[in-house]
Image (tube, rainbow, N blue to C red):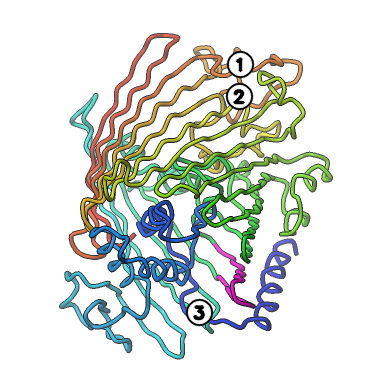
Amino acid sequence: MKHSSIFLVFFSLTFICLFSADYAYTQIENVPLTNPVYDYLKEMRVKRIINSFNDDDPNLSRYQVSDYLNEISLKNNELSAVEKKLLNRFLVEFNPDYISKKTTMSLIKSNMNVSNGFRDFFSDKQKYLFAYEKNNNNIFIDGVGHIYYSNGINPDSRSNAKIIDGGFRIRGSLFDHLGYNFAVIKGAASGDSVLIEKTFPPIKSTFKYQENIENVVNYDFSEGYLKYALSPSEGMNISAQIGREKLKYGVAYSSRLALSGNAPDMDFLKFNFNYGIINYSSIFASTVGEYSPRREERYTKYFTANRLKLSFDDLFDVGIGETVISSRGIELGYLNPFIFYKFVEMSLQDRDNGTIFTDIQTHFLKDFELQGTFFLDENILSNLSDLNKATNKTAYQLGFFWYEPAGIKNLALIFEYTKIRPYVYSHFDFKNTYTAFGANIGHPIGPNADQIFTKITYNLNERIKLRLEYQKIRKGLNITDAAGNLIRNVGGDVYQAFRVGTDSDEAYFLDGIRVNTNNIVFNITYEPVRNYVFDLNYTYNTDKNLSSGIKNDYSFAYIRFGLNY
């Protein structure tokens, strides 16, 4: 009965939408967050070619991306030669008006105006296994897959790993307003386990990989959803979605404090409303707790969030949001998309893990954007005057995005500083930690840590993109003995909450066992023909324990081939 209430909410919204829709779309399904069009739209927003871009809640429908690209086309004279070529490539992928036999192919014979058969499978056309459309209802089937070969460099140049996966994606739109998506990938890995996890971190949060009881190390991913969208009046957009896909929430240039997307994909209900300067969204999602080989110890946890953003053209966006982590089952109060969840959590006797965050992103300078986020875990403003209090569980981010610095076209320079105080993301109830399947739902550096993040990207041309990243992370770890028993809690472990009467009321930033990490990543992405993507990646990492003086170096390189994104 509890789960049926979720469907009741969703389909009630859908029923209301059916009788209030005036505008029709044919591309309701979302664009995967891994698609490079998001980077392009971000660059165009900072350049002020487009007037808005909701990268705080970036899961965009294909029709929204198409609208942005059409807006960019109107300012074609302000684009560099590379930006124009990228625009043309993306228009073929996202704008239905550009589908033709010269631009698009379907392996299985299609009734659309595309070429058919295998002869264009290695051409530069947009490729589908199958494409079909009738009366504004459509279906597109894509093949997806990846092949990795990774080789250690230091400390062991003989270590290597091989990862391969494949699957398919079925997507489309029905009845002008309903989008659907279904995708599945199955993969296998062999070689050095440390290298496997460093090359492909998402594998660590898959059940088959953690269970590891089969003769082949394997993993799988699955996503699917229904999304209903409409515009009851000009300039107003409403959508409701149910299903599973990767989500991100909040603003950041590295990882978001509220929902970074590093954890496993969630099953969710989502509501979005946009009208004028108002952008509002609400999420109710479920995920899993930490993996245990004992089935009776496995459990479900729930993630609830909402966010209100006000957007002022060519000035700034300002937003406020909140999240709640709960493991007690479905609470009807958290299913309400129009309510202040922190006060709901308090009215339910303060048993869950609630946070509040606010952020700002500027747009008044062409080619230069500033943004900042303040994140408050649990305590509402009661101890902010004493920054060393253990109950002062706060975090913040400050950064900038500089596009075409010093007039260098097609180059972006990004900088961000993140500071997370002790005990942030932890909770007195172990099941309510800000984690899922061993991964932090928020920023991956976790509590009692800070990070300097810099990134340079350069579009050499429409097919080759260069990326250089540098991170410096400082972290204070809890002090334990040789057996792993806790000696002193300094708030450095997301799974170890503050213990009243045991731990010190003072929690000094970076106290404990200090570890400094430097990480450098250099990546080249090359798409020789459309839909076939090669990545060459080199990573160098050093960890230095300042308490013991021990330093560890680790470096590796991999090459990856990807079919679609």
Dot label at residue 25 = 3
Question: Disc 1 or 3, which lies upstream in sequence?
Answer: 3
Q: How many marks?
A: 3
Which kind of residue does numbered mark 2 sit on? Pro
Taking the magenta stretch, the answer to whether it contains residue 132 is: no
Look at the image and say whether residue 242 sits in the magenta stretch: yes
Residues shaded magenta: 227-243
Measured as percent of width and height from the top left, residue 78 is found at 32, 61
Q: Horizontal placement of 149 versus 38: left or right?
A: left
Instruction: Decide if residue 185 is on the left or right side of residue 382.
Output: left
Residue situated in front as seen by the camera: 142 or 274 = 274
488 w.r.t. 183: above or below: above
> Which residue position is annotated with label 1?
508
Q: Quadrant of residue 325?
A: top right
Classify 10 Å Cα crowding around label 3: few (below 14), some (14-19), many (20 and above): some
Q: Is residue 273 above or below residue 518?
A: below
Return the disc, 2 or 1, that comes first in the chain's sequence: 2
Mark 1 neighbour density, 10 Å: few (under 14) some (14–19) many (20 or more)? some
The answer to whether marks 1 and 3 mark residues whose Cβ atoms lie closer than 8 Å is no
In terms of image quadrants, where is residue 501?
Answer: top right
Residue 54, image x and y in percent? 52, 57
- Return the mark for residue 422: 2
Identified at 52% across, 82% down, the residue is 176
**Drawn side of residue 494 relative to residue 246, left or right:** right
Specify which label sits upstream in the sequence, 2 or 3: 3
